[in-house]
Image (tube, coloured by chain):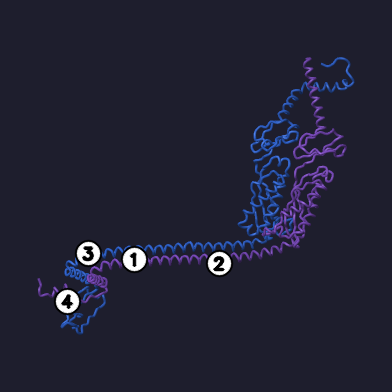
Chain colours: A blue, B purple
C-alpha cells in the first residue's frame, strides 16, 4: 500500500511510469515468472552421443584434468549465462578434408608454381599429389580454445609433411612400392606438427587419391612401366619353366629308381625261384640222371620243333659224313610247319 | 488487497535491484574465457592485462575499458619466394608459421589486429628464408641421401632468426615454422623434364636388360638342377641294377655250383628254347629221337 500524503516531485513524475508498470505487471507477471523459470532452465544442456561438453564458469574451464573437464552424452546441468557457458565438442565425429595444394591444376602445361601444384622428389623429379585427410578432435579443450582453425592447420601441416617426405624418396620408389611408407611418414610428420601447434586434432587416416608424374611425361613413365612389366613377365615365365623342369626331372629320376628297384626285386625273386627249381631238379637228377636228362631233352626238342618256323629232315649220313649235301630254305610263308620236302631233302644232297 | 500490494512492491524492488545489479556487473566485470586475454586501459592508457581465464573487474566506462584479444594459435602461410641456394640453384619456397599473441600490449600497439600481422610476418619470413636457404645446397631440401637433408636445421634456423624479432617488434609468438612448398622456377622445369625423360629411357632399358638376364639365369639354373637330378637318378638306377645283377648272379652261382654239368645241360636247353623261334628252321636227322621210332625195326 502506498504511503499516504502529498506525493514528492519525483513521485509525481514517476507516477505514470509506476502506473504503467503496475498495469503491465497485472497482465504480465505470469509471463515474467515463466521467463525467469526458462532462464533458470537454460542451464540444462543435452550432450549428444558423439559429443563431450566443457563448462566454462566465469570463463574458466571447470575441472583440473581432462577426465573432470569433459562431460559425456546425456543431460548436463549448469548455471545459466553469464555464470556458466557450455561448449559442446563433437569428439567422435570424423571429418574429411581434401588437400590439393600439390595437385595438378588446369591443363597441366604450365608449371608456374603459383598456378600449378607439384612437389619435388628426392631425386629432383616432379610429381602431383592429391590427398584426403580424415581427422577428429582428440583434445576438446585445445581444439575449442587454443588451437588454430582445423582446416587451416591440417592443410599446411599435411602439405609440409608430404613435401618433406617426398623430398627424401626417389620418384620410382614413390610411384611403386614406397607409397605406403610415404603416406605413413607424411601422416606421422603431420600429426607431430598438429601436436606442436596444439591443434587438439588427430589424423585418423591420410590417403593419396592421386600420385602421378606430370601429364607431359606420362608416356615416358608408361614406357618404363611396360619395360618393368615385360621384365617381370620374362622372369615369371622363367620361373614357371623352372617350376616345371625341376619336378619333371625329379619325376623322371624317381621313376627310373623305382623301376630299377622293381626290376631288381623281380629279377632277384626270379633268380631265387629258378635256383630253388634248379636245386630240386638237381636232387632228382642225382637220383635218376638218365631219365631226367632224357625227359628234359625230349621236352626241349618237342618245344623247339613246335616253335620253329620249319623243320627239314635229312637222312643219317652214309659212312659217317655228308658229302655234297645242299639244303635250300625258302621264304617262311612257303615253308610247311614241318615235314620232309623231297625236292630239298637229303636225297638231293647225297 | 494490502498483501497483494505489498508483494507487488517487493517484487518490483527485487526486479529493480536485479536490473541495477546487472547493469553494474556489465559495466565493471570482465569475463575472460579460456583462450582469451583482456587488456585493461584507463582513459586509453593500458594499465594491466587480465591474462588468466575467469572473472576480472574494472572501473566502469569511460574510466576503464577492456580490449579482448583472441589468444588462439593461428596459421599464416607466406607467399612464394624465389631464392638462390648455395650451389647456385634457383628454388621457390613457401613457409607457414603457427603463431599466437605473445605480448598483448605490444601486439595491440604495433599491429592492432590479426590482419596486420600477416604482412609483417610475410616480410620477416621472406628475408629470413632468403638468407638461410642461401647458406644451404638444394640437396639440403630434397635428396635421396639422408645425410644431405637438413630440413630440421633449416626450420630451426628460420625459427630462431624470426621468433625473437616477431616477439620484440610485434608481440607475436612464433611457435612453428615449416617449409610447405619447394618448387622450381617455370623456366627451369623444362630442363627437369629433359632429365626425367632421359632417366625414364635409362630405366626402361635397364628393366628390360635385367629382366632378360634374370630370366636367363633362372632358366639356366633350372636346367642345371634338372640335369643334376636326372644324373643322380640315373646313378641310383645303375647302382640298384648293378647290385641286383650281382645278387642274381650270386644266387644262380650258389645253386649251379651244386651240379655244373646239369646246369650246362639245362642252360643249353633254355638256349635252344629261346633261339628256336618262328624264323628258325630246324634240320633234323630222321634217325633222331623221337622220329627214329618211325624207322625202328623194333616197332611195338
Task: Compare marks 2 and 4 and give the one earlier in the sequence.
Answer: 2
Instruction: Find numbered disc 2 in the image and state the secondary structure of the residue it sits on.
Output: helix
Secondary-structure class at tag 4:
loop
Between tags 1 and 2, which lies in front?
1
Q: Position of residue A41 (x, y in %)?
A: 71, 29
Expressed as whole percent of the image width and height from the top left, the position of residue A38 reads 72, 28
Residue holding disc 1: B244
Distance from Cα at disc 2 to Cα at disc 4: 80 Å
Quarter where residue B257 is shown: bottom left
- Say what secondary structure mark 1 lies in: helix
In percent of width and height, residue B164 lies at 80, 49
* Disc 4/disc 3 C-alpha distance (Å): 34 Å
Q: CA distance from mark 1 to mark 3?
A: 24 Å
Residue under label 4: B286
> Is there one chain holding both mark 1 and mark 3?
no
Label 4 to label 1: alpha-carbon separation: 45 Å
Asked if residue B83 can be seen in this view, the reply is yes
Q: Quadrant of the C terminus of chain B?
A: bottom left
Residue at 17% in and 76% down:
B286
Q: Which residue in the structure is indicated by mark 3?
A: A280
Question: Left of B270 or right of it: where is B224?
Answer: right
Kindly identify the residue that appears in the image at 36 percent across and 63 percent down. Answer: A261
Q: Toward which corner of the image does residue A46 lie, by quadrant?
A: top right
Q: Do badges 1 and 2 share one subunit?
A: yes
Instruction: Tell which of B245 and B220 is nearer to you.
Output: B245
Eye-nearest disc, 2 or 3: 3
Query: Label 1 neighbourhood size at 10 Å, few (<14), some (14-19), many (20+)?
Result: many
Position of A48 with respect to A246 (left or right) is right
State which mark lies toward you, 4 or 1: 1
Q: Are labels 4 and 3 assigned to the same chain? A: no
Amino acid at each position: 500500500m502506498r504511503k499516504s500524503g502529498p506525493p514528492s516531485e519525483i513521485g509525481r513524475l514517476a507516477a505514470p511510469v509506476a502506473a504503467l508498470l503496475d498495469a503491465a505487471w497485472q497482465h504480465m507477471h505470469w509471463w515474467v515468472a515463466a521467463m525467469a523459470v526458462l532462464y533458470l532452465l537454460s542451464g540444462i544442456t543435452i550432450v549428444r552421443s558423439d559429443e563431450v561438453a566443457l563448462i566454462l564458469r566465469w570463463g574458466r574451464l571447470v575441472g583440473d584434468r581432462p577426465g573432470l573437464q569433459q562431460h559425456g552424452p546425456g543431460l548436463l546441468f549448469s548455471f545459466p549465462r553469464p555464470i556458466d557457458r557450455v561448449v559442446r565438442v563433437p569428439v567422435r565425429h570424423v571429418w574429411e578434408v581434401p588437400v590439393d595444394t600439390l595437385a595438378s591444376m588446369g591443363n597441366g602445361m604450365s608449371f608456374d608454381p603459383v598456378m600449378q601444384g607439384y612437389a619435388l622428389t628426392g631425386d629432383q623429379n616432379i610429381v602431383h599429389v592429391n590427398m584426403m585427410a580424415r581427422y577428429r578432435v582428440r583434445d576438446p579443450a585445445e581444439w575449442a580454445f587454443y588451437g588454430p582453425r582445423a582446416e587451416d592447420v591440417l592443410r599446411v601441416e599435411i602439405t609440409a609433411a608430404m613435401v618433406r617426405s617426398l623430398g627424401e624418396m626417389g620418384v620410382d620408389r614413390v610411384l611403386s612400392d614406397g607409397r605406403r611408407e610415404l603416406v605413413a611418414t607424411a601422416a606421422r610428420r603431420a600429426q607431430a606438427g598438429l601436436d606442436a601447434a596444439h591443434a587438439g586434432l588427430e589424423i585418423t587416416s591420410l590417403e593419396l587419391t592421386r600420385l602421378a608424374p606430370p601429364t607431359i611425361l606420362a608416356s615416358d613413365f608408361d614406357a618404363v612401366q611396360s619395360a618393368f612389366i615385360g621384365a617381370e613377365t620374362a622372369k615369371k615365365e622363367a620361373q614357371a619353366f623352372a617350376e616345371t623342369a625341376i619336378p619333371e626331372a625329379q619325376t623322371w629320376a624317381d621313376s627310373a629308381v623305382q623301376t630299377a628297384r622293381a626290376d631288381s626285386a623281380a629279377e632277384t625273386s626270379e633268380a631265387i625261384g629258378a635256383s630253388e627249381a634248379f636245386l630240386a631238379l638237381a636232387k632228382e637228377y642225382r637220383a635218376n640222371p638218365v631219365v631226367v636228362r632224357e625227359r628234359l631233352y625230349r621236352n626241349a626238342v618237342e618245344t623247339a620243333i613246335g616253335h620253329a618256323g620249319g623243320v627239314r629232315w635229312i637222312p643219317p649220313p652214309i659212312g659217317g659224313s655228308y658229302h655234297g649235301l645242299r639244303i635250300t630254305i625258302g621264304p617262311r610263308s612257303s615253308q610247311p610247319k614241318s615235314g620232309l620236302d623231297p625236292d630239298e631233302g637229303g636225297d638231293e644232297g647225297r | 488487497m494490502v498483501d497483494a500490494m505489498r508483494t507487488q512492491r517487493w517484487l518490483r524492488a527485487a526486479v529493480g535491484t536485479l536490473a541495477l545489479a546487472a547493469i553494474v556487473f556489465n559495466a565493471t566485470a570482465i569475463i575472460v574465457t579460456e583462450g582469451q586475454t583482456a587488456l585493461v586501459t584507463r582513459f586509453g592508457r593500458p594499465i594491466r592485462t587480465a591474462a588468466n581465464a575467469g572473472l576480472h573487474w574494472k572501473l566502469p566506462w569511460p574510466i576503464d575499458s577492456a580490449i579482448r584479444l583472441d589468444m588462439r594459435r593461428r596459421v599464416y602461410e607466406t607467399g612464394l619466394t624465389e631464392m638462390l641456394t648455395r650451389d647456385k640453384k634457383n628454388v621457390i619456397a613457401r613457409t607457414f608459421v603457427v603463431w599466437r599473441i605473445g605480448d598483448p600490449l605490444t601486439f595491440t600497439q604495433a599491429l592492432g589486429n590479426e590482419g596486420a600481422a600477416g604482412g609483417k610476418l610475410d616480410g620477416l619470413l621472406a628475408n629470413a628464408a632468403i638468407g638461410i636457404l642461401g647458406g644451404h645446397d638444394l640437396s639440403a631440401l630434397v635428396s635421396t641421401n639422408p645425410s644431405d637433408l637438413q630440413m630440421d636445421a633449416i626450420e630451426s634456423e628460420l625459427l630462431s632468426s624470426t621468433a625473437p624479432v616477431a616477439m620484440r617488434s610485434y608481440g607475436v609468438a612464433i611457435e612453428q615454422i615449416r617449409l610447405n612448398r619447394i618448387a622450381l622456377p617455370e623456366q627451369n622445369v623444362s630442363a627437369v623434364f629433359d632429365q626425367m625423360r632421359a632417366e625414364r629411357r635409362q630405366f626402361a632399358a635397364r628393366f628390360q636388360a635385367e629382366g632378360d638376364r634374370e630370366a636367363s639365369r633362372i632358366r639356366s639354373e633350372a636346367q642345371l638342377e634338372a640335369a643334376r637330378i636326372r644324373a643322380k637318378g640315373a646313378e641310383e638306377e645303375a647302382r640298384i641294377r648293378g647290385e641286383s645283377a650281382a645278387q642274381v648272379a650270386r644266387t644262380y652261382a650258389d645253386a649251379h655250383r651244386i651240379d655244373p654239368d646239369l646246369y650246362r645241360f639245362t642252360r643249353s636247353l633254355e638256349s635252344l628254347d629261346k633261339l628256336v623261334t618262328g624264323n628258325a628252321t630246324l634240320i633234323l636227322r630222321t634217325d633222331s629221337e623221337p622220329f627214329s621210332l618211325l624207322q625202328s625195326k623194333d616197332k611195338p
